[in-house]
Image (cartoon, rainbow, N blue to C red):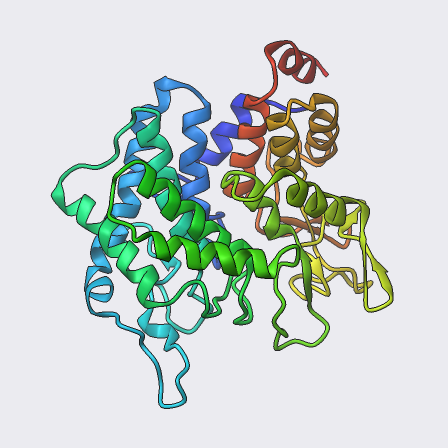
């Protein structure tokens, strides 16, 4: 049974006194990831105006993170080694101590452009909704420095580690997130964004689609032609047209052919991130099965296709534990140790908020 109050309570157990969210209450996940934190914070908007204080505080936490990184934003100009490759440790990182807001480690795939794009997008979206999270001139300067940063790292042409924090390739999900964030910030007049900076990203995004990436991953059996990260191009960024969105949904839900083989990401206990994923493989060699059905529920609810939205929602809700926990992924037919995973709690709450009241009542009554 889906219990909205319990799901929120469990997510908020991950929230620190300063408003920072840790990803999960485990040794390796008890840190602030910008992306995870932003989705958990953004969730408050969908819970109503009574949660505005936590919503604003959560966005200001990320402003504070970027203030600690201001020296990088100000000095970075095409940082490269002698072979011309981007120097990853000099870039903005994705993982921070939830109390001090300092970087946790450099030995890891930190270059994650989608997180920066998501931050810009949410700040602009809240501004459009008359919820200002900017405190002062310093915060506005951070937005402008992030625009300069995205130009200087050449987001439209240089690879990043992506949402899954893995090999360096150019990804439609990363480029699309930045295009979405820059476009929205420009429309709201929150920073000066050269139109060519957006155009370059759009052109590269259209070149890569409908694939996630056309680059060869360092791991040969990883297939990034189709990737669950592309779902975020549909929501929240809404950066692709309906036909392309339908194609991505069909490839993820119905499967696709690649190099003569048929592949499907939909599995009995969730959805693969991409074909060949090695993260937390089961003993029977099946890739981890993530709880992305809540994201599909959001997408279909946005389209007012509530039958499909409810189907995907209930498919994932059936795996919520008796304690009201939503895991990161299933492996060996059970939830992995990253339980509860706050990001998935946020997606579940957002999906539920998008249902009409009568449908919400039916779900709660089950």
Where residue 99 sits: x, y (%)? 28, 50
Q: Please, which residue is most extreme toward the top here?
A: 358
Toward the viewer: 152 or 12? 152
Where residue 180 sits: x, y (%)? 44, 45
Q: Is residue 335 left or right of residue 90?
A: right
Toward the viewer: 257 or 88? 257
Q: Is residue 140 above or below residue 207?
A: above
Where residue 352 sits: x, y (%)? 59, 24
The residue depicted at 70 percent of the width and 35 percent of the height is 316
Residue 305 seen in the current view: yes
The residue depicted at 41 percent of the width and 63 percent of the height is 155
The residue depicted at 23 percent of the width and 56 percent of the height is 145
Q: Is residue 114 above or below residue 84?
A: above
Q: Please, which residue is most extreme toward the bottom here?
A: 82
Where residue 122 sits: x, y (%)? 38, 38
Quadrant for the C terminus, please: top right
Quadrant for the N terminus, please: top right
Occupied quadrant, residue 363? top right
Occupied quadrant, residue 286? bottom right
């Amino acid at each position: 049974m889906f219990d909205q109050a319990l799901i929120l309570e469990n997510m908020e157990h991950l929230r620190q006194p300063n408003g920072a969210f840790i990803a999960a209450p485990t040794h390796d996940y008890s840190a602030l990831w910008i992306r995870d934190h932003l989705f958990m914070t953004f969730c408050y908007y969908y819970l109503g105006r009574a949660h505005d204080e936590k919503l604003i505080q959560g966005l200001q936490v990320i402003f504070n993170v970027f203030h600690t990184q201001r020296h990088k934003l100000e000095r970075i100009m095409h940082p490269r080694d002698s072979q011309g490759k981007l120097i990853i440790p000099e870039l903005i990182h994705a993982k921070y101590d939830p109390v001090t807001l300092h970087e946790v480690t450099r030995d890891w795939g930190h270059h994650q452009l989608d997180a920066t794009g998501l931050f810009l997008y949410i700040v602009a979206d809240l501004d459009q909704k008359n919820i200002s999270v900017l405190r002062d001139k310093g915060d506005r300067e951070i937005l402008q420095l992030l625009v300069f940063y995205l130009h200087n790292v050449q987001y439209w042409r240089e690879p990043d580690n992506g949402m899954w924090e893995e090999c360096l390739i150019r990804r439609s999900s990363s480029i699309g997130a930045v295009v979405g964030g820059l476009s929205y910030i420009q429309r709201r007049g929150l920073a000066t964004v050269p139109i060519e900076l957006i155009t370059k990203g759009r052109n590269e995004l259209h070149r890569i689609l409908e694939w996630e990436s056309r680059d060869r991953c360092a791991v040969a059996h990883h297939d990034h032609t189709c990737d669950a990260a592309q779902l975020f191009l549909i929501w929240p960024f809404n950066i692709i047209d309906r036909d392309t969105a339908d194609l991505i949904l069909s490839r993820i839900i119905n499967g696709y052919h690649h190099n003569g083989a048929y592949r499907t990401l939909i599995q009995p206990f969730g959805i693969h991130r991409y074909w060949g994923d090695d993260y937390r493989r089961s003993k029977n060699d099946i890739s981890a099965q993530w709880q992305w059905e809540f994201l599909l529920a959001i997408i279909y609810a946005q389209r007012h296709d509530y039958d499909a939205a409810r189907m995907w929602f209930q498919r994932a809700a059936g795996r919520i534990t008796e304690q009201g926990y939503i895991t990161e992924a299933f492996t060996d037919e059970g939830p992995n140790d990253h339980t509860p995973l706050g990001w998935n709690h946020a997606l579940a709450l957002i999906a539920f908020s998008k249902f009409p009241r009568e449908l919400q009542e039916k779900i709660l009554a089950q």
